[in-house]
Image (tube, rainbow, N blue to C red):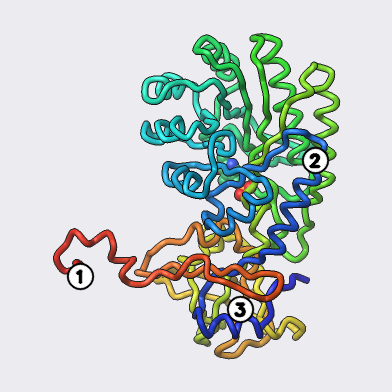
Amino acid sequence: MKKPFVSLEKIKEIAKTYPTPFHIYDQKGIVNNMNELLDAFSWNKGFKEYFAVKATPSPEIIKLLKKGGCGVDCSSYTELLMAEKLGFSGDEIMFSSNETEAKEYILARKLNVIINLDDITHIEYLEEHAGIPKKISLRYNPGGEFKIGTSIMGNPAEAKYGLTTEQMYEAVKILMKKGVKEFGVHAFLASNTIGNEYYPALSKVLFNRIVDIKKQTGANFVFVNLSGGIGVPYRPEDPKADIYKISNGVKKAYDEILIPAGMENIKIFTELGRYMLAPYGGLVTQVIHFKHTHKEYVGVDACAAHLMRPAIYGAYHHISVLGKEDMEPNYKCDVVGSLCENSDKFAIDRVIPKVDRGDYLFIHDAGAHGHAMGYNYNGKLRSAEILLNEDGSYRLIRRAEIPKDYFATLDILPEFQD
Ligand SMILES: *Cc1c(COP(=O)(O)O)cnc(C)c1O
């Protein structure tokens, strides 16, 4: 059973001030989960989580993670600006971009962040536009299929990211000549993994690789960045990742591969997004219409512009009817938004308790890659974000868009100047 972290009474109270739809986040859940991650990896002296900003670029949420000691992983110019505004600097920022623009590298160097190079040709490009730093990371793509046992976890051969094995050696040699003193390695080979095997398997690949690169080139490696990819149980029957088991699996590989190679100071980094936040955010929306045609439809005041994952990936997001959590689910329907797009369905043939107009639905696991993927198609306006504290107090951490925001970039036209 998936239970919302907020009650109907609380949502009614909040909706008086901030109308639905809105995203709501559970401060206690976020902090507890972060502390568990940090505790699980405390065996590694330099462990650091660089929260993937793109998952939830919401400053008040990122501040909670900063307080706990997390850094940030940025993917673009604007995310770097946000990191700077929030007081992150230098080694607290990882810059994992691809098809990077010169102005992004220039800002990254100005902030002295750790650049995670996505391609060997970027060495020259970076040197030309911003200069080569003393510390740099390389994103690795071993190609082929990424398998654990017999199951395929990812398909690196089809992924646009990273350097090939051959290029890794070549890049390290070039960068050493250009004065790089410290190297890191990064790879993201599978997304939203369930089970506890992904990080341990990835660690083995990366640990073995850097041991060999060091042997061949003498390069000084200082960190291994396992990136994102730990999944969350979107479906009620999915297992929850056991972060202690995951961490122990990484430690085992560390002890077996890095320690004997004399690389016992390697820091482990992560760039988790989904795992840090998805379960601790929900999209709250109100039932406004019913439609009985070829199917049963429940129409809500949110749409794919507020949570895109079901529409573009066919992703499952569990839905609770607030106040009816214990009622028998016996009503089969599609829960749909108002976009002129038939993919705008939060759920298809879902069986939920009988709902009434005015009921509030809680769409689970929207805390990462939720609000962040919002867009303005059909003139839809992005929703507010609200942070709920353990004591029941709450505050607005991002206001909802208003029509003026939608028209903001049209202020070059006379009709839209006011
Ligand atoms: C998206 C992304 C992440 C976060 O991925 P999750 O699946 O949310 O954990 C981390 N690192 C990089 C480079 C990414 O692009």
> Mark 2 = which residue?
42
- The residue that label 3 is drawn on is 361
Viewer-side label of 3, 2:
2
Direction from residue 81 to residue 310 in the image, left or right: right
Q: Quadrant of residue 189?
A: top right
| Quadrant (top left/top right/bottom left/bottom right) for the C terminus | bottom left
The residue under label 1 is: 418
Q: Amino acid at mark 1?
A: Asp
Q: Quadrant of residue 47?
A: top right
Q: Tell me how far mark 3 sits from mark 2, CA to CA.
A: 38 Å
| Mark earlier in primary sequence (1, 3) | 3
Q: Secondary structure at mark 2?
A: loop
Q: Residue at x 67, y 28 (%)?
A: 223
Q: Position of residue 323 (x, y in %)?
A: 69, 85
Amino acid type at mark 2: Ser
- Quadrant location, the N terminus: bottom right
Number of other residues with Cα within 10 Å of mark 2, as a class: few under 14, some 14 to 19, many 20 or more? few
